[in-house]
Image: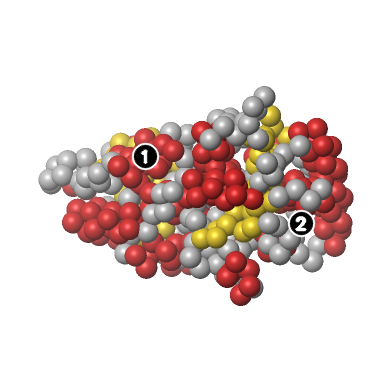
Amino acid sequence: MAGRLAVVAAGGTGGHLFPAQALAEALRRRGWRIVLATDERGAAFADKFPCEERLALAAATAKSGDIVGMIRAGLIVARGVIQARKAFKRLDPAIVIGFGGYPALPGLLAALGQKRPTIIHEQNAVLGRVNRYLAPKVSALACAFPTLERATPGIRLAAHVIGNPVRPEIRALANVPYEPPLGPDGPVRLLVTGGSQGARLLSELTPQAVRALPERLRARLQVQQQTRPESMDSARRTFADCLVKAEIAPFFRDMAGRLGTAHLVLGRAGASTVSELAAAGRPSILVPLKIAADDHQRFNAKLLEDAGAAAVASEDELTVESLAGALRALLEDPGRLERMSASARSVAQLDAAENLADLVEELARP
């Protein structure tokens, strides 16, 4: 087959896989062949990943201080490295690109051992644990945010700040004008996300906050909410009781279409979420995940908060009343929503996928 081959190593959650998919699509347009190296969890989000082959590599992680767990995880990763080495001898990739998280580790360690060119991309505003370990060893580090917490000064200085690759259908929303809610009677569309597996706090709190809104606003409201499976029945009952039109699902695959029509987005502050909100120019209320490693979601949210594109609430401060107040303040102020949309677009880095593809071609073997 014609074209050089790149192995893209990513997995765990959609937050790692979606930027990897955007890069893969950019490389495919340039004639590259793509192989995806992931784990079982990653495969659940890879149904549309543009690759000719998927490598299922053994991978695991463990909590710091759990000696037995760390030994077990080390043995599993070692098995994944052996699997990757065998696969790479057969495939002979010109480069291996990792997108962070423990599922990417075996592929990158195998590539480093075989002295193949390697790139890692950090999606968050904080350099993750796996990428902190790999950063001094790889050919190049690319990152999404102009700040890169937990990186050494040397690593930060050498990093290529390119943004987060977003899927083409999300990037296309940059050309779709934002239209705020019209008049006193027009529909008001609220999109509630929460990461690839939903957010328990938002799943349970949002319907109650919506119920606390004034009746005149509820009558106009149309909610699309990504909800954890165990909370779906309760959410449906609450929305039905307060006569709010609502669509409830554990995962929305057509996110571009939903973002394109949303007046306001409520969600977590994962790296992909922040980047997609900027690209789409959508106002948001963000609730950073409190237990996120190194508090990285709070640093992610700061990009949109500082630009005036998002209202940010901490988990500890979030109540039914405070969330209802935040929703009402924004949904009843079309002018502010429109200004927030423009602010979100001002920090978007729309060419991230192409810029990362440029770096791949610069460093890859002929």
Q: Tell me the quarter of the image containing the N terminus.
A: top right
Q: Is residue 87 left or right of residue 17?
A: right
Task: Determine which residue is flagged by label 1.
Answer: 172
Task: Determine which residue is flagged by label 2.
Answer: 62
The colour scheme used to paint the residues is secondary structure
Viewer-side residue, 235 vs 28: 28
Q: Tell me the quarter of the image containing the C terminus.
A: top right
**On screen, residue 124 above or below 48:** below
Q: Is residue 260 left or right of residue 181?
A: right
Q: Position of residue 109 (x, y in %)?
A: 78, 51
Q: Is residue 276 left or right of residue 124?
A: left
Q: Is residue 189 left or right of residue 182?
A: right
Q: Are marks 2 and 1 in contact (CB under 8 Å)?
A: no
Residue 12 seen in this snapshot = no
Q: Position of residue 104 (x, y in %)?
A: 70, 48
Q: Residues within 10 Å of mark 1 (few under 14, many from 20)?
A: some
Q: Does dot 2 land on a helix, a strand or a loop?
A: loop
Residue at image location 41% in from the left, 49% down from the top:
350
Q: Position of residue 297 (x, y in %)?
A: 51, 61
Looking at the picture, which amino acid does disc 1 mark?
Ala
Please tell me in which quadrant of the rendered image residue 307 appears.
Answer: bottom left
Viewer-side residue, 357 vs 129: 357
Mark 2 and mark 1: Cα distance apart in space: 39 Å
